[in-house]
Amino acid sequence: MIYTVTFNPSLDYIVRIRNFRAGQINRTYYENILPGGKGINVSIVLKNLGHDSTALGFMAGFTGKEIEARLASFGVRSDFIEVKNGMSRINLKMKSDEETEINGQGPLITEEDIEALYAKLDKLRSGDLLVISGSVPNTLPGDMYERIMSRLEGRGIDIVVDAEKDLLVNVLKYHPFLIKPNNHELGAIYGVELKKQDEVVPYAEKLQKEGARNVLISMAGEGAVFISESGEVMKSPAPKGKVVNSVGAGDSMVAGFLTGYMENAGNCEKAFRMGLCTGSASAFSPDLATRQEVEALLATI
């Protein structure tokens, strides 16, 4: 079974505005509300590709109930901890001449809530797969990733981590199955600027030497780089298409990689290409990638 963890789920209110002007009344010409959060995106895309998962995390208030309802409309099962104080956040994603985001805070998560999440994670069994991704809200301990991975260590559970800076670096000692920083996040870890695939490879190899089993680096229009557990280096340009939505593309790549890996008996090359095309399919669509969109791109690379 696949599980995803989103510590601070949201309702993403997505609007499009022509020629946004600050300090004036602006009217939308497009609106949509989607359940948001990196782990949630992974669960939705997995379902779109034909695979079930359970979305874990924290929710609160009427917005939390709406997140659950909208996830259910995608066919995704959720098993959130219901937090008593506050409400799940609403994030505004405004697309105009530039993209602007205003993200809410989220509810107050207590030690009791954290223990409830641990109780759910303790039920995972050998052979299960857990995806932990996204930022940690300030109401949680900053080492939540480490706490979870330490708790599950040695139980035969493959863990995927998609996070930035210390959240990622500090869990490498637990040998995550897969990590997926983008080239900017990778550069920030080592204090360098990485623009080209050849520049990315040695730094991705450093992450592997520090403990990651498989390393997948997304690079937007530059494509992606993958270094397998056996040390094989794979590079690919991005599929051709017009980017209309950057939200969830990296999460879609994770879901696509896992799908390709599961459907092809652990073939990393096929998983890599599936991940690349799934991330691109989401970027080329107003919504998250569908199986049909992914397969159309796979036929082009």
Image: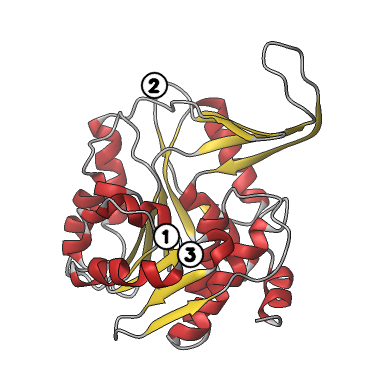
* Tag 1: amino acid: Tyr
Residue 132 numbered tag? none
- Disc 2 residue crowd, few under 14, some 14–19, many 20+, Cα 10 Å: some
Q: CA distance from mark 3 to mark 1?
A: 13 Å
Q: Which percent across, then down, holds residue 157?
A: 29, 69
205 horizontally vs 278: left or right = left
Residue 85 numbered tag? 2
Label 1: element kind: strand
Q: Quadrant of residue 94?
A: top right
Q: Which residue is under mark 3?
A: 254
Q: Which residue is under mark 1?
A: 3
Q: Which percent across, then down, holds residue 13?
A: 65, 33
Q: Upstream in the sequence, badge 1 or badge 2? A: 1
| Residue 280, placed above or below residue 98 | below
Look at 80% across and 30% down and name the residue there: 18
Determine whether label 3 and label 1 are within 8 Å by CB.
Answer: no
